[in-house]
Amino acid sequence: MLKSPEAYRKAQEEVDTVIGTRSIQYEDLNKLPYINAMLRETLRLQPTAPGFSLTAKAEGGEIIGGKYHVKKGESMLAALHCVHRDPAVYGADAEEWKPERMLDEEFEKLPPGAWKPFGNGARGCIGRPFAWQEAQLVVATLLQYLNFHMDDPSYDLEVKATLTIKPKDFNIRSTLREGWTATKIEQNLSGSIRSGQSDRHTSDAAEPANDNGIPFTVLYGSNSGTCEAFAQTLAADAASHGFKATKVDTLDSYARQNDPPSEPTVIVTASYEGEPTDNAAHFYNWLSNLPADKKLKTSHAVFGAGHSDWKQTFHRVPTSIDNMLAEHGSTRICERGGADAAKGDMMSEFQTWEDQVFWPAMKEQFGGDMETNLETEAAVGAQNLTVEVSSRRASHLRADVSEAKVIAARSLTAPGVPEKRHIEIQLPTSMSYRAGDYLAILPLNPSETVHRVATRFALPWDSMLTISSKTGTALPTNSPISAHSLFSAYLELSQPATKRNLAMLISAASDKETKASLESLALEENFANEITAKRVSLLDLLERFPELPLPLSAFIASLITMRVRQYSVSSSPLSNPNVASLTYAVLDQPSMSGQGRYIGVASNYLSHLKAGDVVHVAVKPSHQAFHLPTEGEKVPIIMVAAGTGLAPFRGFIQERAAQIGAGRKLAPAHLYIGYRHPDKDELYRDEMDWFHKMGAVEIHHAFSQAPEHSNGHKHVDDVLRGDRELLGQLWNDGARVYVCGSKGVGDAVKGIAMDQHKAAAKEKGHDDSDEAANKWFESIRNERYSTDVFD
């Protein structure tokens, strides 16, 4: 099933349609024809018992098939492997797994004796009814709560024969489906969750107060939360245009339906190296496998997010979704929009598309009776939110992550250099990870930044705020919350200001000089250079122009909600399955705007945690390619990093050390790592020396401030060029390459790899052009060359 995306999708779709989010009932089992067909087809190809014997009972024996005489009492073996693959019964494709051939109508047409996985007659398996019901329950339950993927996508079935037959060395990995947690699954299995309660990702905007707006649906695909924030923004803005978002949900929430929603639908999604996000994969597979003649009576608009550094896959998924919907008859509401993370101003790009393209098209096609422009649109949040100050305290906790406990934290660097730190976190018992995965952290804003907000709006230290919303919001509403809690935990205060933020300030400005300065900043070139590039926030602008009379409600409504930050886990579960460590740099430096300091939200938050503190976390799987090879004995690995880019590789090396300690012999591993100075910021020196001595890794250093300690090499790319012959040999031996670090490190390693390929091609008389090198590089990406690049 895992090698058949269409079969997997249909099975999960069937479970979602028949059972939904309630607990499974026995009467449901007869309403799962596709799962029943999959079980029958699986038992046809791989019956657990290999066969059974038959004995002729007639006095004169029996003639089998009009050819073969079997004497009375003589036994004959029915080998199910052959019986179940008879092309006369199952056709020329009898060797293929095709569950459609076992749907109820087709199954009833099979000749007697064609399907006998439970044996035959009086000696057939007495436990057949129980086993069948158990299999139905198990498959349906697993598909209801979990997503699955093969640990090794290239695995081909090998059969291991014991008393029964089973797959050999076949491993799969599971992740919770969107909207489910371990606690909710436990409650649902005991029957205590009502239908629909599990959908924690459905926005409050799904049931807006404005019942008179024209309905539309917003669907998103998002790993990091950016596209989800865009979707929430679109839903919140709908009322001011005469529309209402009846649903804000993931694309996969609709993958189980035969068609997309009938009402106008907006799809906001990203690509992850050319692949759909984790919560959009089922929808993408469903759409990709629609029959050519399938027509959709829908209308749609698509907005994509991506990073233009990945030129070959930039906006691939949103573009494909837009084109496939159109090819199947869906009407485009407007031109597809897109945002580029490389420009650092994705929210402004989204809001520009929303204001200038999407809403005008929606009004032209579907109506909508409210006139808006950029300035009134920017201020609409202030109309939808009211803020009441009271004197009572309250706090609200986020529920989209789990509580974990800090058990150790320490600095890894000497005074006087940018600080890098190590933290160890005790995970909940229900949470597991792999070496190379991410740990998502829900941070708090720095207290200094929160204090700046309180000062700007003259809020007393014990202020309590009560928020109410006309259109739905992710913020806590209708009960008091302290201003400190709201601005610490729920809102992003340091994000670069958007064009809509500037339009709002221009509209609010009464002083001509202030208005002129803001209008100058809003010019395209100035905005890019002075706001986006220097990461000037809305709060920075309010401090720069203190005379602006902006209401507190408008400020709150203009901010996006707090997002999780992902860090590479720097440990291996083989070292301790319940503890994950992070290795990170603390960002605290002069602001590029020249206005105070720029303090990293998540790194500053982590740096203040101590043993015993509680932190909200979630494990996020990294790309399948960014994990250790399953055949560690045969596949060498090359790891390249600088500074805290070491994080995932420390996990890899820890895992290899545990395997070697258990007696496993592994192929070589080489780590190329760059630091400033061996006495100032070489991370985990003693530990790495130990790993080196036990054979878990060979380490090649580059010290930019002390090249005399690294054979004269100042940077990692220098070391790589010096080891050209060694790297070539490792590559010829089938090595996998992993790169983690800044974009500069990623580009340098890619350049070296392509140069080496071109040199080898030229030596062999092959095409050594840049075009050929690029084509070769794309062919090995996520196969033998994997990156985890950040800025």
Image (spheres, rainbow, N blue to C red):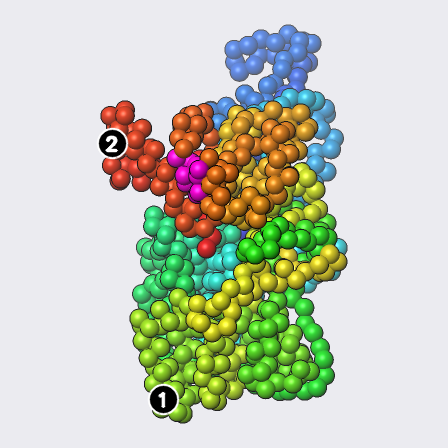
Residue designated by label 1: 513
Let me know if residue 718 is in the magenta part. yes
Q: Secondary structure at mark 1?
A: helix
Q: Residue at x 40, y 92 (%)?
A: 510
Is residue 272 visible in the rendered image? The answer is yes
Q: Which residue in the structure is indicated by mark 2?
A: 767
Relative placement, left or right, of 117 versus 224 is right
The kind of secondary structure element at disc 2 is loop
Q: Is tag 1's residue or tag 2's residue first in the polypeptide sequence?
A: 1
- The image quarter containing residue 752 is top left
Q: Residues within 10 Å of mark 2 (few under 14, many from 20)?
A: some
Provide residue 159's location: percent of width, then percent of height: 59, 24
Where residue 643 appears, x then y in whole percent?
A: 52, 48
Q: Specify the segment rendered in magenta.
A: 712-721
Out of 9 and 601, give the one closest to the viewer.
601
The structure residue drawn at horizontal position 51% and vertical position 58%, both measured from the top left corner, is 224
Residue 647 in the image, given as x and y percentages of width and height: 57, 46
Q: Where does the image place residue 403, in percent across and percent down from the top left?
A: 70, 59
On screen, 786 above or below 522?
above
Q: Amino acid at mark 2?
A: Asp
Camera-nearest label, 1 or 2: 1
Is residue 443 depicted above or below 643 in this figure?
below
Residue for point 43% across, 80% down: 378
Give me the disc on residue 363. none
Magenta-colored stretch includes residue 458: no
**Measured along the vertical axis of the image, is residue 306 above or below residue 347?**
above
Question: For the stretch drawn in magenta, what is the main secondary structure?
Answer: helix
